[in-house]
Image (spheres, rainbow, N blue to C red):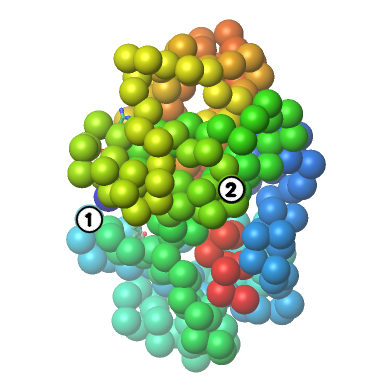
Amino acid sequence: MALLTPNDLININKQLQEADSTVQRVTGLDIKGICKALYGTFPGSEKVGIVPVTSGNGIIGNFSASLNAITQYFGFESFVTDMLDVSGYYEAVRNGAEIILMADDYTFLAHNLKNGKMANNQPCTGIIYAEIASRYLKADSKNVLVVGLGKVGFPGAAHLVQKGFRVYGYDPDENFLQRAVSSLGVIPFNPEKPKKFSIIFEATPCANTIPEPVLSENCVLSTPGIPCAISEELRTKYDVQLVAEPLGIGTVSMLYSVL
Ligand code: NAI
Ligand code: PYL
Ligand code: MG
């Protein structure tokens, strides 16, 4: 898994506010509105306990503090435990946490201790970025290009297929592409024979993954992928509506999915 760095999370509140404005402009709904429409839930007074985890590559500076800021931005009560790992989990539950958020290098989970529901960040991130893309108010067709069909991209592509979109997919890994073609009915996209899209969803750990010929003027590019899929130069040239944020949109999708 491509791991976040403390730099990705600098000014997380500002990053969230900017993403929220873009989502509102692109879809007519803010991020909370997208979550409510997607999961049919809304927060009551759930208290979220955030547990820092030291295993593997260890603590990511700003990670727990960013989760705390994110959960509060979306209206949840939350706290970060003083203790780490198992002792932190014990502290969170003893202090009344109803939802636990914690991550190692492979899994970032939300677990609602009251109703038993559990969420994984990768599918929840793919689904919400795909949902945002699918709601583009100025889309010119039901065609969507999905770039990257891994742990985040595949569930996002599945969501778009389920919503009735014509999903074109690209992944340089032939096994990932074939899985999406055979199990979802995704249409393989050939970068040698490009066509233009007004809706693009990207989920790769690489930069500059969007070939210029697929961009239409004012298209939406909804991408959780880090680093960003498009250069600033191309973004400006095609006036691309860019939905990209490193942690918050995926996290709130997890939280609403366990309510
Ligand atoms: P993954 O490794 O499971 O999948 C990535 C896929 O992208 C692979 O199938 C790979 O073959 C493909 N790929 C690589 N280069 C490509 C290219 N040039 N064009 C098309 N496809 C290409 O990774 P995962 O877990 O799906 O994560 C994807 C990205 O999303 C990572 O950068 C990760 O850090 C980020 N992420 C961001 C989150 C957020 O909230 N913003 C949350 C979770 C993940
Ligand atoms: C959740 C993100 C999105 C992209 N990559 C995922 C990642 O960086 N995972 C690792 C999270 C480790 C957190 C660390 C801590 O500070 O508690 N164990
Ligand atoms: Mg996110």
Give the residue displayed 74% in from the left and 55% down from the top.
33
Number of labels in the image equals 2
Give the residue displayed 41% in from the left and 42% down from the top.
186
Residue, disc 2: 164
Left or right, 15 with respect to 44, comes to left
Q: Is mark 2 within 8 Å of ligand 1?
A: no
Q: Is mark 1 within 8 Å of ligand 2?
A: yes
Give the residue displayed 53% in from the left and 64% down from the top.
254
In which quadrant of the rendered view does residue 91 lie? bottom left
Q: Look at label 1 and name its amino acid.
A: Asn
Looking at the picture, tell me which residue is in the foreground, 116 or 131.
Answer: 131
Q: Position of residue 249 (x, y in %)?
A: 57, 51
How far apart marks 2 and 1 lie (CA) works out to: 40 Å
Residue 155 visible in the snapshot? yes
Which corner quadrant holds the C terminus? bottom right
The dot on residue 57 is 1
For label 2, the crowd category at 10 Å Cα-Cα, with few meaning under 14, some 14 to 19 and many 20 or more, is few
Q: Position of residue 205 (x, y in %)?
A: 33, 37
Q: Position of residue 30 (x, y in %)?
A: 74, 48
Left or right, 21 with respect to 191, comes to right
Looking at the picture, tell me which residue is in the foreground, 84 or 8.
Answer: 8
Residue 244 visible in the snapshot? no
Q: Look at label 2 and name its amino acid.
A: Gly
For label 1, the crowd category at 10 Å Cα-Cα, with few meaning under 14, some 14 to 19 and many 20 or more, is few
SS at mark 1 in the image: loop
Q: Position of residue 16 (x, y in %)?
A: 63, 44
Give the residue displayed 56% in from the left and 74% down from the top.
258
SS at mark 2 in the image: loop
Label whose residue precedes the other's in the sequence (2 or 1): 1
Callouts 2 and 1 close, C-beta under 8 Å: no
Is 181 rendered above or below residue 172?
below
